Image: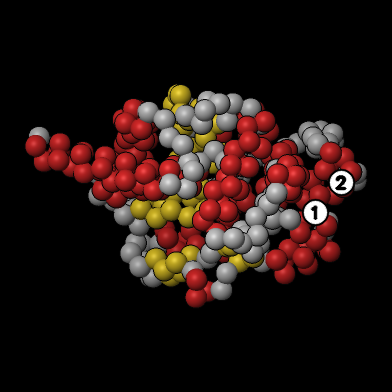
């Protein structure tokens, strides 16, 4: 029992230490200990039990709208899984699999000019994504490198900046705004959801291609996910508010590199709006765990589906 208590306090200390670092970059956390006990520990327990039941490396998909804190949550889960449950956990983001600016430029000329802007399905390298997951999941593991995308440069970094994975993981946390998103039907695609679609996609070319990407290339990637977790915002208006805050925090971390203005953020999230709204509607049937977030960016409820 004493050893268990000692282990618990050690993990809690690491958790609080991580949060303190995030607060230095402007993030706010509420009820830290309460969230640790009622949200993070139960989720990690569920993940660990899933791993034990399958007796192999598992993939946890973590999704939610922009600014919901997916990266922070994935790092907290990793901290607890590594230190309390003693399982090697690897986290990576779908954002690091954006196509290079050069490739998006080619796609924008071949398909539609809106594909120059990163974000929607079609702007990721799904082949690289799928191969990465397969390398993490294979029984005879071999060290390899995870790609790295620099948002301030809007381009993928060279291989010398990629992260080397040297040890086989038991848990893989795959986070991203559209992870496990489902395609819409043809009727749902007809009406534009915002001014961006109304002005720039009158013939539905862009959103049909995005939808087609979800049906095919992304579906084959998402099939590799064992457990799906969704961070649910109160409504879409908070996506802009929290994405703007995220941009301010990025400015602190990037040391003066080019960051989006308020108007640029407003336009940028329009690219994500259609799929984000659909995910908000369908969360009950598409996810195993849903964490509801209130207007103060605090988790208020956790439900299993």
Query: Residue 23: image x %, image y %?
Result: 43, 43
Q: Nearer the viewer, residue 240 or 199?
A: 240
The reply to whether residue 115 is visible in this rendering is: yes
Q: Residue at x 78, y 67 (%)?
A: 106
Q: From this viewpoint, is residue 126 visible?
A: no
Q: Residue 48 appears at what percent x and percent y?
A: 32, 42
Q: Quadrant of the N terminus?
A: top left
Residue sitting at 36 percent across and 32 percent down? 32
- The answer to whether mark 1 and mark 2 are in CB contact below 8 A is yes
> What is the secondary structure assignment of the residue under circle 2?
loop
Relative to 40, does residue 57 appear above or below in the rendering? below
Closer to us: 233 or 202? 233
**27 left or right, relative to 81:** right
- Label 2: how many residues lie within 10 Å, few (<14), some (14-19) or many (20+)? some
What residue did someone put label 2 on?
201
What colouring style does the render use? secondary structure
- Whole-number angstrom distance, CA of label 1 to CA of label 2: 9 Å
């Amino acid at each position: 029992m004493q050893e268990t208590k000692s282990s618990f306090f050690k993990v809690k200390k690491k958790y609080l230490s991580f949060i303190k670092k995030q607060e230095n970059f402007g993030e706010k956390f509420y009820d830290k200990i309460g969230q640790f006990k009622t949200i993070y520990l139960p989720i990690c327990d569920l993940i660990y039990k899933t791993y034990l039941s399958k007796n192999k490396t598992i993939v946890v998909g973590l999704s939610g709208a922009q600014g919901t804190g997916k990266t922070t949550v994935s790092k907290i889960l990793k901290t607890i899984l590594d230190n309390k449950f003693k399982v090697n956990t690897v986290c990576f983001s779908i954002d690091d699999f954006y196509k290079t600016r050069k490739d998006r430029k080619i796609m924008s000329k071949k398909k539609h000019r809106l594909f120059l802007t990163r974000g929607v399905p079609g702007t990721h390298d799904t082949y690289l994504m799928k191969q990465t997951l397969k390398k993490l999941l294979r029984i005879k593991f071999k060290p390899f490198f995870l790609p790295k995308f620099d948002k301030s440069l809007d381009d993928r970094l060279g291989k010398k900046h990629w992260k080397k994975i040297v040890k086989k993981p038991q848990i893989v946390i795959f986070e991203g705004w559209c992870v496990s998103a489902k395609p819409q039907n043809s009727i749902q695609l007809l009406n534009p959801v915002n001014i961006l679609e109304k002005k720039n996609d009158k013939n539905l070319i862009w959103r049909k291609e995005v939808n087609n990407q979800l049906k095919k290339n992304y579906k084959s990637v998402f099939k590799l996910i064992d457990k799906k977790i969704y961070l649910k915002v109160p409504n879409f208006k908070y996506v802009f508010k929290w994405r703007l805050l995220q941009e301010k925090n990025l400015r602190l971390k990037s040391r003066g590199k080019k960051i989006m203005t308020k108007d640029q953020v407003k336009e940028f999230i329009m690219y994500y709006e259609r799929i984000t709204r659909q995910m908000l509607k369908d969360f009950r049937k598409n996810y195993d765990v849903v964490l509801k977030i209130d207007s103060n960016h605090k988790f208020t409820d956790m439900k299993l589906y």
